[in-house]
Amino acid sequence: MTDHTENIISPWEIEAFVQNLDISVLENVGTKSWLEFHKRLTLLNQQSVLEVTGLREESVIEWFTSLKKIPVLIHEVIQIDIWKHKVFPHLIDLNNKPSNTFMLFSILYHEVVAASLLENVLFHCESAQTLDDTVIDLIVYAVQCVTMLLDEKSLEIYESLQIKTPK
C-alpha cells in the first residue's frame, strides 16, 4: 500500500505560499482574501507538522527562515490576539447568539495555526537567529498569555467549569 500522506502541498507550492505571505491588515480579518490567507497558512502548518513528525526534510521551516517571513507569523499571532480582546467582545454585544459561528471559529483558530507554525519554525536555532526586533513583540505576547492564564479572574472561571465528581 502506498503512503498517501507524502505531501499536503507540493514543494513548489510551499515556496510560493511562503514567498507571497504578507502581513495582513486588521480591518481585513474575516474577508474573503483573509480566508484565503488563512487557508494557505493552515496548509503550511499541516505540511510543517507532517515534515516534523515524519522526520523528513523540513522545507516549510527552511523557506520561512531563508525568506525571512517569521515576523509575519509573529504579527498574525499578535493581531488575532488583539482582535480577540478588542473586536470579538463588541461582536458578541451586537449579537449575543450568532446563528453562524464558522467565521468566528476561523478567526480564533487562525491564532492557533500561526502559533503552531511559529513553534515549529522557531524550534531550530537558525530560525531564531534570523529574528529581528519582532522577538520583543513575541516575548510580550507570551508574557501576556501566561499572565492571562494565571490571572485570578481567569482561574475562577476555569474552576467554576470543572466537572464535579459524585461522591
Image (spheres, helix red, strand yellow):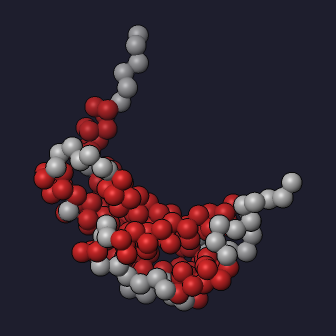
Above or below, 144 relative to 58: above
Q: Percent from the top left, x then y, of residue 103? A: 33, 58
Residue at the spot x=46%, y=82% of the render? 21
**As drawn, is 92 to the left or to the right of 7?**
left
Residue at the spot x=59%, y=64% of the render? 46
Q: Quadrant of residue 8?
A: bottom right
**Residue lying at the far top of the rendered structure:** 167
Whether residue 126 appears in this view of the structure is no
Above or below, 115 relative to 130: above
**Residue lying at the far left of the rendered structure:** 94
Q: Percent from the top left, x then y, of residue 27? A: 24, 75
Q: Quadrant of residue 166?
A: top left
Quarter of the image that includes the C terminus: top left
Residue at the spot x=47%, y=63% of the render? 113
Q: Percent from the top left, x then y, of residue 117? A: 52, 68
Q: Percent from the top left, x then y, of residue 149? A: 33, 50
**As drawn, is 6 to the left or to the right of 139?**
right
Total number of numbered discs in the rendering: 0
Residue at the spot x=26%, y=65% of the render? 83
**As drawn, is 87 to the left or to the right of 147?**
left
Q: Nearer the viewer, residue 61 or 158?
A: 61
Q: Nearer the viewer, residue 29 or 61?
A: 29
Q: Nearer the viewer, residue 82 or 19?
A: 19
